[in-house]
Image (cartoon, grey):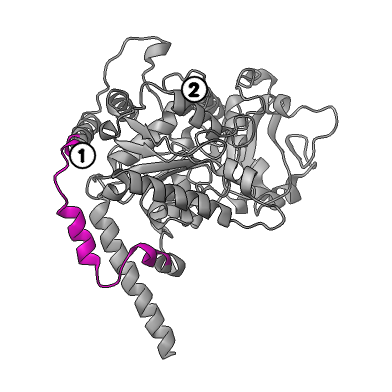
Amino acid sequence: MRQFHARNLYVLLFVGASLALVSALVLTKGLKGSSPWPWTTSTVKTYSSTFSSPRFFNHTDAIRQKEFMVAGNVSNKKKSVWERPRDAELERVEAGLARARALIRAGTINQSSISAPLGEEYYVPQGDIYRNASAFHRSYVIMEKLFKIFIYKEGEAPLFHIGPCKSIYSIEGVFFSLMERDTHFRTLDPDQAHIYFLPFSVVMIIHHLFDPIVRDKDVMKHVVADYVKVISQKYRYWNRSLGADHFMLSCHDWGPWATWYVPRLYYNSIRALCNANTSEHFNPRKDASIPEINLITGETTGLTGGLPLSKRDILAFFAGRLHGRIRPALLHHWKEKDELVQVYETLPEGLSYPDLMKKSKYCICPSGHEVASPRIVEAIYAECVPVLISQHYVLPFSDVLDWGSFSVQVSVDEIPNLKKILLGIPQDRYIRMQERVKQVQRHFVVNNPPKRFDVFHMIIHSIWLRRLNVAV
């Protein structure tokens, strides 16, 4: 018993020391008493239970943090940061970010939008799909003028700088490809950068190095840890911020796990992830949720659009394999039991998955093995109102988008009452939600070359918000 208490006391001391260090290094810039970004003035209903009691630290995490903490030497760590030699370039970068924060706060308080000409090229966010349209617009325009990203050139294909573009993990490859060719946000001068991109592809690491028989995930450890070691020894930027102004991006289920092997990457860096699961230590204050998009052909051409409301005669539709914790309940209650709520594990011959989505009023989007599902974006493409059934999932771009305005959120316990819930939604409310689905579609479409406010720019904006939330 004494040994048990001693061990737990040791863990508590390290948790306290770790929290103190992270607080000293990563300073949030939200207003006192508010969420981390000043324009998010209310909490989305989906996340209320998750945000009120986040699980960012536990016993295992405390032990892991010992890897970059030295007991009894916390003061020296802090001293080395605060008394570092003057860095004129960093001071310039931080001064620019401080001005950006002030401008965005001013726009939030005044509720005034930056004027712009009308037309597709000069789209101005408006309407109920946004949590604060004017503040989002102001933030986006400032991002376009200011934000610069440096991509480390180290690493070779196929593990670095490229990713899949024709699979369920397409967004990983799409982002890598567009970012490598970008001339607007990308800078070749690291001293001009606000943030630094670590271009390793978890999907490609798993595809080329993971043995499905041995199933040793340490292959990720060797690649990711060695890469961070290389760039931290060759450049000064990682050590300067302890990784807080760096980001990685992954749509693989194991994306979060790949960062576990480098504690500073796991705790400090921005992680743009499809698997945005707060029960697995996704931290929405520093991590960004990105959408899972299944591009079978590598393009979205022909995927968007649906039938008019008068021809949507299916109340709700789902087809998908039985896995995870939520789908068994959905299929148990609704599999091939109702003409209005059409739920299939395998589609009968002659039925088309895309056509059924375009004929449905609501598209059921339950989590599978992991919280993210490509069905959410597929529903938006088909102009079908998403019915979200998940747990601990931070929805993509939820610091900007008000998901409650264009989707229906159903708890697992409410699955038996799914038909009653959907039939209980008044027609005028459904029409408004469906119109908003059409409006929000632009933020999830993949374009090559990218267009303003499309999914590529929305991902960059999510990263921009989190960089604003850090003072180096």
Quarter-of-image position of residue 468: top left
- Which is the main secondary structure of the residues drawn in magenta? helix
Q: Mark on residue 442?
A: 2
The amino acid type found where label 2 is placed reads Arg
Left or right, residue 321 beside residue 389: right
Q: Is residue 221 visible?
A: yes
Position of residue 184 measured from the top left corner of the image (x, y, whole percent): 36, 21
Label located before the other in sequence (1 or 2): 1
Q: Which residues are magenta?
A: 64-92
Determine whether, in the image, residue 69 is placed left or right of residue 78: right
Badge number at residue 187: none
Quadrant of the image occupied by residue 287: top left
- Mark 1 is on which residue type? Leu
The picture places residue 48, in percent across and down from the top left corner, at 43, 51
Q: Residue at x 40, y 51 (%)?
A: 229
Horizontal and vertical percent position of residue 431: 55, 25
Residue 132 is a magenta residue: no
Looking at this rendering, what residue extends furthest in the front direction? 234
Residue at label 1?
A: 90
- Locate residue 399: give its quadrant: top left
Q: Which x, y percent locates residue 162?
A: 53, 33
Helix, strand or loop status at disc 1: helix
Residue depicted at 67% across the width and 41% down the height: 419
Circle 1 packing at 10 Å, graded few (<14), some (14-19), many (20+), is: some
